Image (cartoon, rainbow, N blue to C red):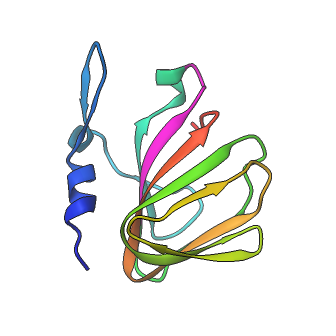
Amino acid sequence: MNNNLFEAFNNGFLKLTNKTVEFADIPWSKHPVFEGVELKHIVTSKDTDGKFSYHLVRITPNKSIKNHTHETQLETHEIVAGFGVCINDGITIPYEVGTISIIPSGIPHEVTAGDDGLYLFAKFIPALC
């Protein structure tokens, strides 16, 4: 697997009019529920008055973000590296680099990484955290 695009995000930055946030300065956090899933909280509720949040997500090989629902957030996924599948409202969507997936609020979904892991950029409207 070519991880260059993921590493570009992992070492990228957020450029705002009044500051620059280096992604390398943001620690990885273990997902509180799902084993093998880590998050880097790029933009959080406190940055946007709760309007949206952005998160870099890495899922280790063959691990899953198990079936769950966000009752109030629309969620998007942009696949940066790796392969996997998303089951979105009962429909299986192959996840490969360049895929963008939209999960409306209230829709059950899960994401499973393939043998090389899966790296995605997740956005939530309104903010998840």
Whether residue 5 appears in magenta in the rendering, the answer is: no
Expressed as whole percent of the image width and height from the top left, the position of residue 85 reads 55, 77
| Quarter occupied by the N terminus | bottom left
In the picture shown, does residue 83 fall above or below 30? below
Q: Which residues are magenta?
A: 49-58
Expressed as whole percent of the image width and height from the top left, the position of residue 59 reads 43, 69
Expressed as whole percent of the image width and height from the top left, the position of residue 69 reads 74, 56
In the picture shown, does residue 71 fall above or below 30? above
In the picture shown, does residue 73 fall above or below 33? above
Res. 123 in view: yes
Asked where in the image residue 45 lies, by quadrant, the reply is top right
Whether residue 57 appears in magenta in the rendering, the answer is: yes
Res. 67 in view: no
State the predominant SS element of the stretch in magenta: strand
Asked where in the image residue 83 lies, by quadrant, the reply is bottom left
| Quarter occupied by the C terminus | top right
Expressed as whole percent of the image width and height from the top left, the position of residue 127 reads 60, 34
Foreground of the two, 20 or 35: 20
Asked if residue 17 lies left or right of residue 72, the reply is left
Foreground of the two, 103 or 47: 103
Residue placed farthest to the bottom in the image?
A: 115
Which residue is at a point 56% across and 32% down the rendered structure image?
52
Asked if residue 48 lies left or right of residue 68, the reply is left
Asked if residue 49 lies left or right of residue 117, the reply is right
Give the number of callouts: 0
Which residue is at a point 78% across and 46% down the rendered structure image?
71
